[in-house]
Structures are given as C-alpha cells and as structure tokens.
Image (cartoon, coloured by chain):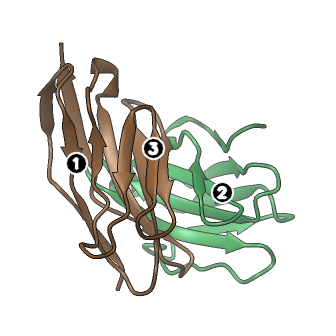
Amino acid sequence: GNSVTQMEGPVTLSEEAFLTINCTYTATGYPSLFWYVQYPGEGLQLLLKATKADDKGSNKGFEATYRKETTSFHLEKGSVQVSDSAVYFCALWGGYNKLIFGAGTRLAVHP
Amino acid sequence: GAGVSQSPSNKVTEKGKDVELRCDPISGHTALYWYRQSLGQGLEFLIYFQGNSAPDKSGLPSDRFSAERTGGSVSTLTIQRTQQEDSAVYLCASSLENTIYFGEGSWLTVV
C-alpha cells in the first residue's frame, strides 16, 4: 500500500543554516506529493505541493522536487529562521480517498 | 468563510460522556475529511465524505465514533462514551480536487 517515510526529528539548527528534511514514499501509479507545516498550537497548513515527476513546489523560501526515480520529495530551505520552528509533514495523495502522512519532523531553529 | 472552520476549538469532557465536533468546510468543496492527531503521534485518517456518495468509514477506530454530513456541507463527528485514549486533536479538512485544506482542529481532552 501507499506509505510515506520521513527522517526522524527533532532537527535542531541555528538561524540562517541550510535545512533538508528527507521524505521518501511508496505508491503505485503517480501520486501527488505535499508538505504541510504545523506551527505550535495551530492546525496544518499546506506549505507546497507537486503533482508530477520533476515538478518543483516552492513557498516561503522552501522547495521540494518530485523525484520519481528515487521516490523522494525532500524539503529544503537555504536559510532558516526562528519562525520556521514547527512540525513538518510530508504527504501523498494516491487516490483511495485519503492523504497519507509521514510521522512528521520537528524543526527547532535557535537564534 | 475563507477557510475550514471547526468548533469547539477546545473541549474538556468527563470520561463516559458523548461529544460532538463540528466542521464547516470551504464553500464549494465537495470532499470532507476527518483526521485525528494524538499527542506526539502522526495523523490518523478517520472518515471521508464525497458529494452524495457513501462515506469511507474505514479509519474510524471503534463503533463509538460516527460522523455525518448534512446537505453536502457541514459535518459533525460524534464520539460516544468517551475514553481517555480519545484525547487528541481532531482535524477536519476539505478539498475540491486533490489539494486538501485543514481547519485549526478541535482539541479534545477526556478526564
């Protein structure tokens, strides 16, 4: 069945450091891929998405490229800020009426 | 409204009581989802509604959980005879195509 695997957290970085959060998936067909972010005490917000191979989703300085050959959708940001501290969820939509989420990766950015 | 609206935002209830959680999806969105997020855990799919089709209830954890969607819009998730393990954030989401937008969640605490 469909599944998503994310790197375990927490990820702790200093401000302005480079961020990578790894995400790989298992799916039949051609799923759409998403990153959601959950700030402390808040609900989930869509951060970015990609719907086909080689697409790059981007938003708020974050990027992720849909790599079908490696079944990956790694999240990157060149220079993180304290305000980026949150939990990040990778997810796939492969049909079957549901979005499949990874376990989430907590990011803590220190000044 | 502009986003998915959920109420109550916080609910504390005694073990054994019934609770109802409400969701107003984004206007025009035909699909509605309920997810559960337990403390320190990932997101668990509960139920999915799409138009007038029979709902996908495959994620409901027990027969104490039920949901309905009236008029293709507002949905209510009902938990009967609540248990402490039901304590979680219950997230509602809606979509028009394959991008899902979440509400802020209803934080349920069973004491």
Q: Count every numbered label the image shows and give the total.
A: 3
The kind of secondary structure element at disc 3 is strand
Question: Where is residue A6 drawn, in percent x and y?
Answer: 22, 59
C-alpha gap between disc 2 and disc 1: 26 Å
* Residue behind mark 2: B94
The kind of secondary structure element at disc 2 is strand
**Residue at 26% from the left image edge and 26% from the top image edge:** A80
**Colour used to depict chain A in the structure image:** brown
Question: Where is residue A20 drawn, in percent x and y?
Answer: 20, 44
Residue projecting furthest to the front: A54
Instruction: Judge from the rendering whether residue A27 lies leftward or rightward of residue A70; answer left or right.
Output: right
Callout 2–callout 1 Cβ contact below 8 Å: no
For disc 3, the neighbor class at 10 Å (few under 14, some 14 to 19, many from 20) is: some
Which is nearer the eye, A27 or A1? A27
C-alpha gap between disc 2 and disc 3: 22 Å
Task: State which quadrant residue B93 falls in.
Answer: bottom right
Chain at tag 1? A
Chain at tag 2? B
- A73 lies above or below B89: below
Mark 3 or mark 1: whose residue is earlier in sequence: 1
**Residue at 78% from the left image edge and 37% from the top image edge:** B1
**Colour used to depict chain B in the structure image:** green
Which is nearer the eye, B47 or A81? A81
- A38 lies above or below A48: above
Instruction: Have a look at marks 3 and 1 and say if they share a chain.
Output: yes
Callout 2–callout 3 Cβ contact below 8 Å: no
* Residue behind mark 1: A21
For disc 1, the neighbor class at 10 Å (few under 14, some 14 to 19, many from 20) is: many
Instruction: Have a look at marks 2 and 3 and say if they share a chain.
Output: no
Q: Nearer the viewer, mark 3 or mark 1?
A: 3
Q: Nearer the viewer, mark 2 or mark 1?
A: 1
Point out which mark residue A58 bears. 3
